[in-house]
Image: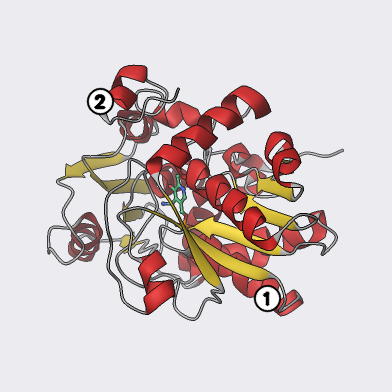
Amino acid sequence: MDIKNGFVATVGNTPLIRLNSFSEETGCEILGKAEFLNPGGSVKDRAALYIIEDAERKGILKPGGTVVEGTAGNTGIGLAHICNAKGYKCLIIIPETQSQEKIDTLKTLGAEVRLVPAVPYKDPNNYVKVSGRVAAEMDNAIWANQFENLANRQAHYETTGPEIWSQTDGKVDAWVAATGTGGTYAGVSMYLKEKNPDIRCVVADPMGSGLYSYVKTGEITPEGSSITEGIGNSRITGNMEGAPIDDAIQVDDRECIRVIYQLLNQEGLFMGGSVGINVGAALALAKQIGPGKTIVTVLCDGGARYQSRIYNREWLASKGLLPS
Ligand code: PMP
């Protein structure tokens, strides 16, 4: 018998998918870790589970307690599922710029959702800071604190990294991923570098994020903006501190949308916006390092969460991003 014990045991062990059209185009093996197949629909299920189980082990999350988090949506969705499965309450602070689909999903899952204006991290009313204050003021509540809580990258160091290593039989030349908290990028990079220091670890960055300039010049100088959600940062989070970084690749929204529609029309994969940045960066990396290499990236979440945005022609046109 092969039966998973509930939602929690179903997190992780996702397939690694060869992206055929992109692989043929570049002569590299371009592989996507299918994180959209997690039971809560995104890569963040892994971090949510590790954060909750770490708090349980430390005795700070007690029966009937509340998990509070500031999130662009996916971490909140993962937390809300796990809270339901384990009997906790969930309170989510989310910037009002995030897609309605993610906000509606959080509400359907029974999380209390508080929308806040999207303001920069340095502002005390930034969603991350609000979530920390709200958690501190509540009884029997924990702050998941995904940006600084290292249980986040530990999830990827202990699960995503080893899965990629064994799924490729260790034949991986490069790993490239965009970062939100950096948990996925850092955990996988740290694991793969330990296995083989020659594996090239590359940060993918959308416009409007400061990591590309940080890697290239040592200064965080973001330029432009991006329609992608859940990725990009203007600071080095706790989860990114000490992570191996060999290089960075910047991908703009036009290329992101082109890639998203190629994934849809030629690969049959209906993906979220951050996947366009990841696969766009994998393509650019393939061109840099030449054919014959194996490049792994992440398929973070599915497209249904963005139906009203990147899959809506009027919305795309309003952003000047309608693909030809
Ligand atoms: N893609 C999407 C759609 C996300 O929601 C997130 C997390 N916010 C990421 C990528 C980045 O993941 P991480 O936080 O592990 O860097």
The reply to whether residue 302 is visible in this rendering is no
Element type at mark 1: helix
Instruction: Choose between 253 and 58: the one closer to the eye.
Output: 253
Provide the secondary structure element on which disc 2 rests. Answer: helix
Q: Say which quadrant the C terminus sits in.
A: top left
- Is residue 39 placed above or below 58 in the rendered structure? above
Residue 285 drawn at (x, y percent)? 61, 57
- The disc at residue 296 is none
Nearest the eye: 240 or 215: 215
Answer whether labels 2 and 1 touch (C-beta < 8 Å). no
Query: Distance between the Cα atoms at labels 2 and 1?
Result: 42 Å
For marks 2 and 1 on the same chain, the one whose residue lies earlier in the sequence: 1
- The local crowd at label 2, few if under 14, some if 14 to 19, many if 20 or more residues have their Cα within 10 Å, is few
The quarter of the rendered structure image containing the N terminus is: top right
Label total for image: 2
Task: Name the residue located 69 percent from the left edge and 56 percent from the top edge.
Answer: 295
Can you identify the residue that label 1 sits on?
193
> Residue beneath label 2, please?
318
The amino acid beneath tag 1 is Lys
Image x and y of residue 26, in percent: 71, 46
